[in-house]
Structure formats: C-alpha cells, structure tokens
Amino acid sequence: MSKFPAGVVYGQQLIDLYEDAKANGYALPGVNAVGTSTVNAIMETAAKVESPVIVQLSFGGGQFFAGKSLENGNFEASAAGCISAALHVHQVAEMYGVPVILHTDHCSLKNIEWIDRLLDYQESYYERYGKPLFSSHMLDLSEESIEENIDVCAKYLERMSKLEIGLEIELGITGGEEDGVDNSDVDVSKLYTHPSEVFYAYERLSAINPNFTVAAAFGNVHGVYKPGNVKLSVEILKNSQNYVADQIDKTGTKPVSFVFHGGSGSSQDDIRKSIEYGVIKMNLDTDMQWAFSAGVRDYYAQYNEYVATQIGNPDGDDLPNKKYYDPRKVLRQAEEYFVTRLEESFADLNCIGRNK
C-alpha cells in the first residue's frame, strides 16, 4: 500500500510528506522542467524508484513551455506555460502512480506579477475544483532587507493558505548564475544565513500557516564547479535548526523544513549531513540539463551518417532515413539519459522506495 496517493500533492498532504522526509532521513529532488519530455522523464524516474518527486518550473522554464516566440512583457507567457505544464501533470501523474509536488522556482520582487497571475488563475481553479493547481510557489526576495522579504512573504502566504498552497522562501543569496539571474559577484557574507534570520522568518510565517519551507544560504552556488571551488557550511543548517528549536522550547526537534539550492557537484557527505539537519528538498537543474544534452549529443554521434540526408546511408544509397531523424528518437534517448542521472540523485538523497 502506498504511503501517499498518486497525483498532485497539496495542503496538509504536502506538510505531512515533508514531515515524513525529516522523520525518515530523506529529501526529495526538486527537478526543473522545460517541456513535456523533461516533465515525463521526472515522473518516469519517480515511478521507477517508487518515491514522491517535485516537478518545478522557473520563470524562464514556463516561458519556454509556452513558446519562446510569445510576448512576455507582462509575464503572460511565463504564467501560461506554467499553467499548461501543471495541467499536464494533473492529467497524467496518477497514470505514473506517483505523488507529485508541483512547484515554481525562484521569483524575485521584479517578477512578482508572474506569481500574481498564477494565483489569480488558481483562485478560479480552486473555486471550481476544490484544489489548487500548484502545490507550492517560491518567492526569492533575498535581495531585499530581511524585514521586507518576510513582510511580502507573509502577505503571500496568507493568500496562498486560502488555496492550500505552500510557500518556499529564500534567506541569504545562492551564488552563481541560474535562469538569467547572475549572483556571481555577490558579497560573500550574503552567501551564509544567520540562525537569527531563520528564526525571524519562522516565527512570522508559522503564525500564519506551517506550510512553508526555507532555502537558507550556506555557501551554495548555482551551476557546477571544480571540486573545492564551492565552500559549503552545512553546519549553518544544524545551528539554525537548533536555534529555532530552542527558541520555541522544542529542543532536539527539527521544526524547520530546509531546501538545498545549488546542489550540483555537492559531495555525498554534505548532502547526507544537510538531510540530517532538516533538508527535505534539493534542487536539480544543471546536472539534469547536462544529462539531457548528453543524450542528444550521443544520439547524433551514433547516427551521424543516418541523419545527414533524408535518403541514403551506410546501409544503402536508396534507403530512407526517416526513422532516424524522427525527433521522437533523439528526444527519447535524451529522456533515458535524464532518467538514469535522476536515479542517481534519488539515491544520493536516500529517496528510494519512499512511497511504499
């Protein structure tokens, strides 16, 4: 019997799932998607490892899902693409037999209308179907003061709570570059969150609703770098967890659900320690992009002489090549490479067989 039902998880089920992860020492991969090939590959992998999974879309990923040729000056394409992707997941998640958390990634204050559009749509959707389209949304207001960051997040959590949608916040800045946001030259001190900031956010938000997670910065950086170039301080998570627990008179517990951003290239030891300290989600994008790209690369390397022309290949000058240049062939190989790499991440996160 499955621990959580197949389909899109939201509301109390989402809270329960993250609590189960903390209690049992695993984290869920939050995997960025840009089209049905990657969305389907994420769910295919989750089905193989019999565990829940997080399908997430970024501002740019949503725009790409809708179509890069579309006007996006008022965030309409980014919102439409995310809605389209979410509807697709709702349609097929039960067929894959896995619980899916639908999530949107980093949203800065300048892009907040993107989330407004998604919430506007979901208010009508919730009224009609009695459930939200997305499980959660992320607001990344780490460039603002801690006070403004939490003031805005509190306002949105109140609105989202009415729809049974969770919130992910960011405290401190994740370095590197991701989806057009470049923090490569940020002040190093901003890459590390202080425990008092975590408690400030926890105290404010928990008074509204417990359905929130915290992406605290502990030196993590988007992208992939040579070993030793990224200095992680996972002890920040431990110290923050202990500080919050002490402040609320629950010493020895893990009240905060942490999110690990910029995890590409992280050591197994750092990943497992972060889970021990309360990480319940680790974002994956860079390594998955590489896996998908490698599938495309290797396909064309293998069948180079079969896709150079429509007719004629090493097996015969008059033979058609349609079955080789059919885009489903190369996309399927890319999906298979993606699945193989994602299985590794599920194992790294101790997330095998977690829905049994």
Image (cartoon, rainbow, N blue to C red):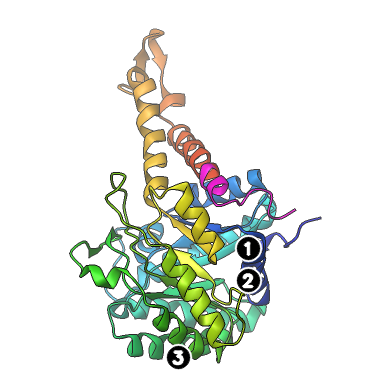
Crowding at dot 2, Cα within 10 Å, few <14 / some 14-19 / many 20+, comes out as many
- Residue 207 found in image quarter: bottom right
Disc 2 vs disc 1: which is toward the camera?
1
What quarter of the picture does the N terminus occupy? bottom right
Q: In this view, does 199 lie above or below 81?
A: below
Instruction: Please report whichever mark, 3 or 2, sits nearer to the chain's N-terminal start.
Output: 2
Q: What element carries label 3?
A: helix
Q: Which residue is drawn at 26% across and 73% down?
A: 73
Question: How far apart are the two marked residues, 1 and 3, measured between alpha carbons?
Answer: 27 Å
- The kind of residue on which mark 1 rests is Ala
Q: Residue at x 71, y 55 (%)?
A: 355
Magenta span covers which residues? 344-356
Query: In the rendered structure, does residue 352 fall within the stretch colored magenta?
Result: yes
Q: Which of 59 and 91 is in front in this view?
A: 59
Residue designated by label 1: 21
Residue designated by label 2: 14
Instruction: Please report whichever mark, 2 or 1, sits nearer to the chain's N-terminal start.
Output: 2
- Residue 194 found in image quarter: bottom left
Left or right of residue 291: residue 347: right
Crowding at dot 1, Cα within 10 Å, few <14 / some 14-19 / many 20+, comes out as many
Residue designated by label 3: 155
